[in-house]
Image (cartoon, helix red, strand yellow):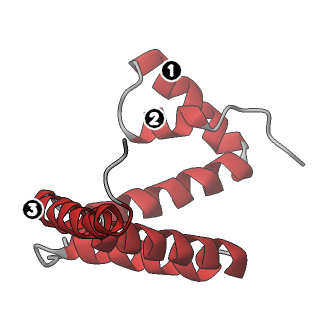
Amino acid sequence: MDCRFKKVWLSYYLDGMLPLKEREKIEAHLKTCSLCAEELERLNRIAYTLKHLRSVEVSPDYDQKFQRRLEEREEKRKSPVLVLREGLSRGLEDLIRIFTPQPALVKIGLGIMLVLGLVYFGREIGNKGLPE
């Protein structure tokens, strides 16, 4: 047996959010419908439990720790291919950062190349002579 009464009205009834006329209709229905009376009793127990819950104190960094645990769990769920790809990507980024020339190093390198070039071409010119 299933009651066609809309259960949402029981929550409004329990919260005292219905006009007197509607409350009386629900009370009359509850006298004849054991399913709705049981549902109202369940809702009463839930409301009582929620009213008497104690608050829980959490550490100030709880959100960050929780987020880190979620990320760690997500890492474990990833396929080995994705983990490998991400690791290689991070490694490549590190290599690029290491080998990206710095402005001073570029100047020093260009100076060394210029000196070596002059020495090399100076020998070539010395061996062959100047073009005529």
Occupied quadrant, residue 18: top left
Furthest residue toward front: 132
For disc 2, the marked residue is 13
For disc 1, the marked residue is 22
Q: How many marks?
A: 3
Q: Do the residues labelled 1 and 2 touch (CB within 8 Å)?
A: yes
Occupied quadrant, residue 111: bottom left
- Name the residue rendered at 65%, 71% in the picture: 82
Q: Can residue 53 be seen in this view?
A: no
Question: At numbered mark 3, what does the secondary structure look like: helix, strand or loop?
Answer: helix
Q: Which of 123 and 41 is in front in this view?
A: 123
Instruction: Give the Cα distance between marks 1 and 2.
Output: 8 Å
- Name the residue rendered at 72%, 32% in the picture: 5
N-terminal of the pair, mark 2 or mark 3, is 2
Residue 104: image tag? 3
Amino acid type, residue under disc 3 in the picture: Ala
Q: Can residue 111 be seen in this view?
A: yes
Instruction: Give the Cα distance between marks 2 and 3.
Output: 78 Å
